[in-house]
Every structure is written in C-alpha cells, then in structure tokens.
Amino acid sequence: MTTASLVNDFEAYNQWRQELSRRIAEYRVWLGKEDLNDSQRDLRLQQLIDRLAEDKLHVAFVAEFSRGKSELINAIFLSDLKQRLLPSTAGRTTMCPTELLYDPARPPMIELLPIETRSSNATISEYKGYPDEWTVVPMNTASAESVAQAMQEVCRVKSVSVDEATRYGLYIPDDPQANLSQNSDGTISIPAWRHAIINFPHPFLEKGLVVYDTPGLNAIGVEPELTFNLLPNAHAVLFVLAADTGVTKSDIEVWRSHIYARGKNRGRLVALNKIDGLWDDLKSEAQINAEIASQVKSCAELLGIEENQIFPVSAQKGLLAKINGDQALLERSRLAALEAALSDELISAKQSIVRDQTEAELGDLLDNSIALVEARQRGIDEQLNELKGLQGKNQDVVGHIMAKITTDKESFERGLQQFQALRSVYSQQSIKLFSQIGMDILRDEVRSARESMVKSRFTKGIRDAMSNFFKSVDLHMEKANEQIEEINKMMDAMYRKLNLEHGINLISIPPFSMLRYRKEMQRLEEAYDQQFNTIYTFLTTEQYTLTTRFFETLASRVVQVFEILNKDVENWLKAVMSPMEGQVREHQMQLRRRLESVKRIHKAADTLEDRIGELDQMLIEVTRQHAELNALSEGIRQALVPSTSKPERLAA
Ligand SMILES: Nc1nc2c(ncn2[C@@H]2O[C@H](COP(=O)(O)OP(=O)(O)OP(=O)(O)O)[C@@H](O)[C@H]2O)c(=O)[nH]1
Ligand SMILES: [Mg+2]
C-alpha cells in the first residue's frame, strides 16, 4: 500500500516529461527531413532531450538525531519492500549523509567514502570522480538479509584517538557536545564513513528520485557539502521534529542554520513525528487531536512559520500500517497529508524549473525556424509578383527589372561586408567577455584567496581573504555584464539595419541577465558568513582545518556556478548570432535566384509561364512547411503546460 497522491503525481510528472521529449524529438526529425536543421540547432535540441531524460528529483531529510528521519523515508518511499530498509534505532543511527538513488548502469550496492578523506581538502563531489576511493559493499536485492546487512554500514562507527578525531574536524576540545562521544578509555567514537551512496532498484528511485538521509546534525562534523550544495539544491527539504522531545534548542539551531536561514521557503516542509506517543487509550479521539493541534501550534510559534506548514505524523505506525495493509492505522498515522504536501512541493518545484528552462531554450529555436520559413515564403511571393508583373511586357521592361535586382543584390553585398565586419567585432567582444568570466580567471581568484588564507591564522585575515574573493568575483561579473550590454547594443543595431535596408525580419533575442548568477554568489557568501560568525580572533589548528575545508567546498560551488554561467553565456552568444547568419544566407540565396530567373527570361531561355509555374509549386511546398511547423510548435507549447495537478488530462 503506497499513498496514491505521490505515485500519481510522480507518474503524471514522468508522462509530462516523456510527452514533451517526444514532441521535441518529432520537431527535430521534421527539421532534418525538411532540410531546415543546422548542426548548432540540432545539438541544442539533442541537449534538451537528454536533459529531460536524465532529470532527477532531489529530496532531503534534515533534523537533529533520533527524530525519525530514516523511519520517515522508510514509511514514505520504501514501504512496499515490506521491511525496514534504512536502519532506524534509538540514539544516533545514521552516521553519515546517505544518498539513496538508482543508476541501472551499475549493480545494486553501497558505496562508502572513508572518514579519513576528511583530512584532505577535497570535497565529496570531487571524490565522486574517483571510484577507487570508495569502499563498495555489494548487495543481493533478492535477499532481505543481504540488504539489511549492507544497510548497517551507514551506522558504522570506529574508535580513534583524540588527535585523529581532531584532524578530521570531529572533535573540538572546549565543546561539551564533543565529550559525549568520548569513550571511557579516552578514545573518541567517530563515523567510519564520510558519505554513503546506496544504489538500490526501487520504482521511485528508478523514476529519478534521489533521497538524502542525513545524520543528526550538530555543530562539529558538519559536511560543508550539505550547506553549500545538497540542501540549497534539493527540490524539497523536510525538517523533522518529534512530539516526545518538542522543539529543543538544537532543533532550532539546525532549523536556523540549514533550512530557514536560506530565505527560500519554497519546497521546505516540517513534520512533527511520533504523534503515536500522544495516543492514549484513556483519552477520547477529540482530546488527542486537540493535544496534537496544540503541539503543532507551539512548534509553529517557535519556528516562526504558519501552522499549516507543519504536518503531524507517525512514521513508525505509518510504516507498520502500510506493511500490514491496515487502513485505519494508516489514517491515524496521518502520513497521507504529509505525502500529498511533499509530492506537491517536490514535483511542482521541479516541474516549474524544468519547464522554464525548456521554454527558454526552445522558444527562440521555434521562433527562428518559423521566421526562416516565413522569410522563404515571402521571398517566393515577391518573386512571383515580380514575374507576374512582367507578363505581356516587352524585353526592355524585363531588362529594366534585371537592372533593379542587380542593384539590390549589389547593395545587399555591400551590407554583407558590414555584416562580416560586425562578426569580427562580435568575436573580439566575446573573447573580452570570457576574459572576465572564463574558468581560468576564476581559478586564479580561488588560488589567490587560498594563498591569503594560508598566510593568515587570524579570523580577521581569513574573513578579509573571503570577502576580497567575493568582491573580485563580483567585479568580474559586473564587467562581464557591461560587455554583454555592448554586444546587445551592437546586435540590436544590426538587427534594425538589416530590417530597414533589406527587409529582413529577425526575432530579437532577449538580453542576457547576470542577476541570477550574482544572486547565487551573494547567497554563498551569506552562507559562509553564517558558518563563521565566530568570536575567535585566533584560530586553533582544528578550527583552521574546518575553515579551509569549508572554503574548498565553497570554492567548488563557485566553480560550478561559473561553469553554468559559461555554458549559458556561450549558448546565448550563439542564439544571438546564428539566426542572423541563417537569415542573411537565406536572403542572399533568394536574390541570386531572382536575378537568375529574370536573366533567363531576358535571354528567352525560359518562358515566363514555366518560371511562374515552378514558383507556384515552391510556394505550395513552403506553405505546407509553414503549416506543419506551426502545428509542431503549437504542440510543443501545449505539452509544456504541466498537468500534474490534473492527472486525468493525461489519461485522456
Ligand atoms: N513512537 C515512535 N517512534 C518513532 C517514530 N519514528 C521513529 N521512531 C523511533 O525513533 C528512533 C529514531 O528513529 P530514526 O529513524 O533512527 O531517527 P533519525 O532521525 O534517522 O536519527 P539519526 O539517524 O540518528 O539521525 C527509533 O527508535 C525509531 O524507532 C514514530 O513515529 N513513533
Ligand atoms: Mg537516521
């Protein structure tokens, strides 16, 4: 028994993606068949189709330890396995961030990154590129025992000396919390693994869902990856409280530093778990409900959110109910309401991102191919009028027309020289643009920030190095922005000139905006500031290690943002230039054809009637193309409109 809404929404979302990608593929094949494709356009379409296919949905569970994160994941996503997949026990259970996904290209297994890797500066993302750094635990999915045994790995701890724990940033001497994990022989218990990836064939995971289970977060041992990468990029984050503990100080801390403070409250949900603890046979249902409601109210007040954003549930009873097919217990666990909200947030958030991206990419491709066919249609039309006007006229008039077309052609060829000049200015400006945002520039900035950090052991010095880093990155972005504006102005002038002097109609490309990328930088800087709002003036070795590790993760995030920026700018530059090239080519060809046919008529090599007949045929052909293209474009635009909220529309 799995709750209907999540399955339905997921199904509808996947059908939406498939339908969209089918239509884009159809458009691509059509362009090829009609000889209207070029390599640039073809590549962009292929990328769009690939992106739709590999599309992943990320959901993260975050809370203090023992609030029931793992149990909730078992209950919401994995109950059909009729067993408890993720280990869930009292006390600290999940010891490292755990990614649950399915990649059919690899066998079912758990990959584990040893905790020792924390002594290096490399981030988890970087380690993902080196499979030999990971320990692999194979899994036989046909055997519940084999699976359960493999899963136990995510709970593995080991005892190390204080020195070693300190080296990994897992022990801070003055922190009373750190002493909790100190054993009687003076050693420290630390997680054996830094990160786990579970490759497990399960229907949800097969469809592209990625679930992150996190260990109870406390101040030490936090992976910067969570702060900078995983949580901000998750489409939904579920924060879990427990009814038996209420909202504790450390719950608030986790909430503030990992969820609420991000300022982005879309896709953020709160579960109040373990409500079964309030089920009391001596109380009436109404009394119990009133008690749950009052807990929800006080949690909402403490977290500073609306009551309807908190979902009271019992993960444990929900899981049990689903395994036993106990409908009454399932209802009492209130899991369905949480699942509905989660699937709504998760899927609608993801869908709107995918839709916007696809729309932006496809929009100008479609508009441009329509514009090209229209230009061709117009050209043939004009030529027909020209030739029809010659019917019954003598050779002199034909000669006169021929002279006029020749002048047109010459004037256009002069214009063409200007266009070539513009192209060379455009390449120079593109180079200048990348000299501000190129990856090597960024690497230099990262290197110099790292060097100044190494030189300074004082908090202030490190903070200065960081803020200088962000300042210079922003300055590069600002200069790039100026460059983009110049390119925009130049292209705009050329668009207008081509239109005015040669009647070429072009769809203008929306200007590129840096805002999104600059905002992301600001967000990263704020996240960093928040982590290091420390009062220390001098850093101990441990704090220093922690700080530099944070910097490396942060830097790799900045690199990622720049990689995306570079790709987007490249695509934009092509999107601005390539339709212009296409249209100029088209115009040139038409002029040549016009001149050719008038010449032949002048020399009496062709009859006027034959030529008109030919052009009529061509016009019929282009008109057919135009109609088909319009239909394809309309179909794609309709397929873009999401229908997850109305799954019945898909069935029709
Ligand atoms: N009564 C009750 N107990 C629950 C419920 N959900 C989880 N628990 C218990 O709470 C304990 C902790 O659950 P986990 O799922 O391990 O919690 P977690 O948040 O993953 O904890 P860490 O992995 O340590 O961070 C276990 O003993 C669970 O059996 C619930 O809905 N009701
Ligand atoms: Mg857990």
Image (cartoon, rainbow, N blue to C red):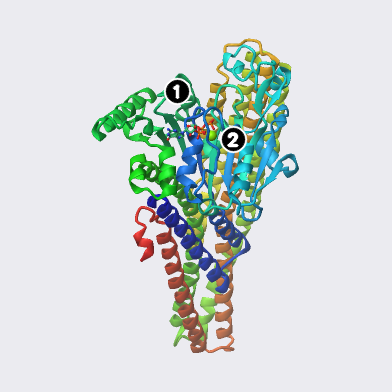
Q: Where 355 falls versus 470 (above or below)?
A: below
Q: Is residue 595 left or right of residue 330?
A: right
Q: Residues within 10 Å of mark 1 (few under 14, many from 20)?
A: some
Image spot of residue 477 (x, y percent):
58, 34
Which residue is located at x 54 percent, y 80 percent? 399
Rendered image quadrant of residue 474 = top right
Q: Nearer the viewer, residue 286 or 259?
A: 286
Image spot of residue 439 (x, y percent):
68, 39
Q: Residues within 10 Å of mark 2 (few under 14, many from 20)?
A: many
Rendered image quadrant of residue 86 = top right
Q: Which mark is residue 252?
A: 1
Q: Secondary structure at mark 1?
A: helix
Alpha carbon of mark 1 to alpha carbon of mark 2: how far? Answer: 20 Å
Amino acid type, residue under disc 2 in the picture = Pro
Amino acid type, residue under disc 1 in the picture = Ile
Quarter of the picture containing the C terminus is bottom left
Q: Where 43 falls versus 102 (above or below)?
A: below
Image spot of residue 465 (x, y percent):
65, 21
Asked whether the viewer can see residue 505, the reply is no
Q: Nearer the viewer, residue 589 or 141?
A: 141
Asked whether the viewer can see residue 643, the reply is yes
- The residue at which mark 2 appears reads as 97
Image spot of residue 332 (x, y percent):
33, 40
